[in-house]
Image: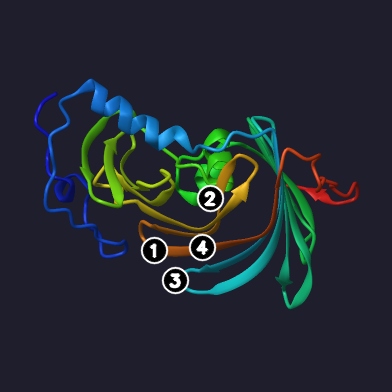
Amino acid sequence: MKKVEAIQEAITKKDTAQVVVIKETPEVDSAAIVADIMGKVIQNKIDFQTVNAKIKVDYEGAENKDNYTVYLSMRKDSVIIIRVKGSFLGISAEGLQVKINKDSVTLVRKVGEKYIMNRSINYLQDVTQIPFDFATLQDLLIGNPIFVSKNLVSYKNSNTQLLVVMVGELFKHLINLDKNDNRVLYSKLDDVDMQRNRTCDITFGGYQPLGDYMFATNRKISMAEKAKLDIYLDFKEFTLNDPLKYNFEPPKNYKRK
């Protein structure tokens, strides 16, 4: 494998994201080493049939901040149902319902201007400016690393942590693993396209048992391109492989957009 750049050069520094400084970067020249590291990255990936969760969500953008309670039911590779309760136009209520499947998004706004909106799955990309598809979104919600590439270009092995840099088609990706149990501690995505200047940092914490896995109950997601958005997820309830707890009930008399 050809010589790679140092990690601090492979991962673009941005004012809006945490700067990771690593002094030594061994060259990845062994297929066995690469296979072992990639195995560690995916070893703790949570496999599931269904997930139910109650999540306290706080977000802070450039112009405003707010908090909500989100109720989540998800069937693997099939459907994601999200119900959002909070203060909408000064009213404390369930204000949004969202149903996502592999090719479409249906959103119901229940407070203020009430309507049902049907869009293709590309709507997720339009809203977030991140190339989300269904599989990526479900990994993000369950706490699995996203945009994982097999093109591992560099790593650092310390006493307690393993830091891995991979470069995919869209993102340069640094993943920080706990060496004791291979839990993902930190994930940093930077756009390969320097003209886009997108970055996304995800910090994982509050790990608790969930079936045969360890589940990150606390996460901070920081996204930036032209503006910065911080999202904090605090999972208050979560179960694996139970019947779906929350359903999707769009009112029949709402107008459609």
| Label pair 1/3, CB-CB below 8 angstroms | yes
| Label pair 3/4, CB-CB below 8 angstroms | no
Q: Amino acid at mark 1?
A: Ala
Using the image, determine if residue 197 lies above or below residue 37. below
Residue at the image position 25 percent from the left and 51 percent from the top: 159
For marks 1 and 3, the one nearer the N-term is 3
Q: Amino acid at mark 2?
A: Val
Closest to the observer, 171 or 21: 21
Q: Which residue, given by chain and number where applicable, does mark 1 sit on?
A: 227
Q: Alpha carbon of mark 2 to alpha carbon of mark 1: how far?
A: 13 Å
Q: Amino acid at mark 4?
A: Ile
Residue 131: x and y, percent?
46, 40
Q: Which residue, given by chain and number where applicable, does mark 2 sit on?
A: 127
Direction bottom: furthest residue: 90
State left or right for residue 27 relative to residue 47: left
Name the element at disc 1: loop
Q: Quadrant of residue 105?
A: top right
How many labels were placed on the picture? 4
Name the element at disc 4: strand
